[in-house]
Amino acid sequence: QIMKKKVLKFGGTSVGSIDRIKHAAKIIKKESDLGNKIIVVVSAMSGKTNELISLSKLVSTNFSKRELDVLLSTGEQVSCALIAGALNEIGINTKSFMNWQIPILTEGENNNARIINMSVNKINDYLASGGIAVVPGYQGISSSGEITTIGRGGSDATAVAIAKIFDTDSCEIYTDVDGIYSTDPNKIPVAKKIEKISYEEMLELSSLGAKVMQSSAVQTAMIYDIPLQVRSTFTDRPGTKIFNKENLDYSKAVTGVAYSKDDAKITLQSVEDKPGVAAEIFEPFGKHHINIDMVIQNVSSDGKTTDITFTTKREDLNKSLEILKKNTNIKFKNLSYKDNVSKISIVGAGMVTTPGVTYKMFRALAEEKINILAISTSEIKISVIIDERSTVKAVKKLHNIFKLD
Ligand code: ADP
Ligand code: ASP
Ligand code: MG
């Protein structure tokens, strides 16, 4: 066996209790006993980050973003020390490195920064001396020395960044499921494990709600062609390989079904129909950093004006309504919204070469009497907005109709 340099990332549930931490330590030891050089990336113990967010809210509904990052980064610090301690306990030479000790350099605002670089010397020297480095996911330090976090689920992004910057031979994501499934196996038990998936498909699935991999981590992996392996901390079964699609064959049109419940739908009725209205409506959203997802425009019932429906993130709903009400450059008769909607998406690189997928999806939803409120498509995905109550029914039906069961 040739010696390899590896990133092993353990998610929240994988370090969720002392027993689990000891178990993760055994996996790390096994890899180390094979002669590999290992950088471990850890998440906070499961539930910890949410708990810390709740604490901040008890102190203030307007808690400083700077202090929130100081607070949230502690979750990963705790698991780093516990993992390193557990490794020491079984006779392994190891050390934790905090974000500022490495340092992991980030750019961008608090709570939503990105990793731009890392110094490799300290850790490489330590690996060369035979030690295992334990690094906290989800955080870094800005050029002005402030502690930052990089967005929820961000330990995945840390793992990928380390794989790139340290030029490791592999990046293994250890989690509580044994791979990527055709849909969330914890919600839809007939979901099937996918052996190999392309970066593109994984990126769509992640962005559309499959939280098993953070989408910006997948994006970085895709840009730099860093193959990822998603596997279980709790079983030995082989996981899923996420890699360059040239190596895949596409026998199925649809690879997976994803859903999310974080959208809201807004409709402006009887908008004046003339050039430039859409621009006037959406311009202020850009200024307020609110993303618009789907947009549908159709003729109003009076035949002269137009109705415009669009979706945003649910957390941006109130701000969006405010923006529309304040916008004196647009005229409309009525403003309505719905926040109990969900977005259901089918994803598959095979769609490109399979005609009729769109029709099949809509027909299937109609058979279940599910009303489609908005639609958006790209080359390898189709998303629809539906009533939130029909989420599971829709996912099950699509999963079945596209033969993923
Ligand atoms: P970790 O704490 O290890 O980062 P996460 O909770 O972030 O783990 O992600 C794992 C979870 O993602 C699984 O428990 C599963 O419920 C969910 N999930 C959603 N969609 C999928 C999918 N298509 N395949 C596998 N897991 C999925
Ligand atoms: N602990 C962070 C979170 O819960 C990062 C992660 O788990 O990846 O979002
Ligand atoms: Mg995660």
Image (tube, helix red, strand yellow):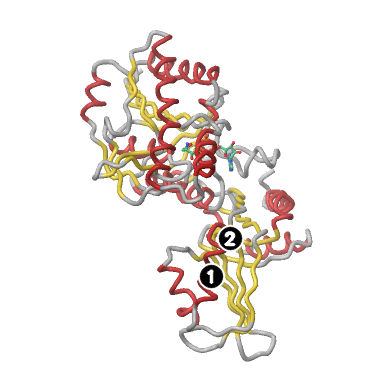
Disc 1 crowd, CA 10 A, few/some/many (<14, 14-19, 20+): few
Q: Compare residues 244 and 277 and report the one nearer the observer.
A: 277
Which of the two residues, 323 or 94, is positioned nearer the viewer here? 323
Position of the N terminus, as image quadrant, is: top left
Q: Earlier in the sequence, mark 2 or mark 1?
A: 1
- Determine the residue positioned at 60% across, 77% down: 268
Residue under label 1: 322
**Coordinates of residue 361 in the picture (x, y in percent):** 67, 60
Q: Nearer the viewer, residue 97 or 110?
A: 110
Q: Where 37 falls versus 267 (above or below)?
A: above
The residue under label 2 is 382
Describe residue 160's horizontal placement relative to residue 18 as left or right.
Answer: left
At label 2, counting other C-alpha atoms closer than 10 Å, the crowd grade (few under 14, some 14-19, many 20 or more) is some
**Amino acid of disc 2:** Ile
**In the picture, which quadrant includes the C terminus?**
top right
Left or right for 130, reference 137: left
Q: Quadrant of residue 337?
A: bottom right
Give the spatial CA distance, label 2 vs label 1: 30 Å
Q: Position of residue 274 (x, y in %)?
A: 51, 89
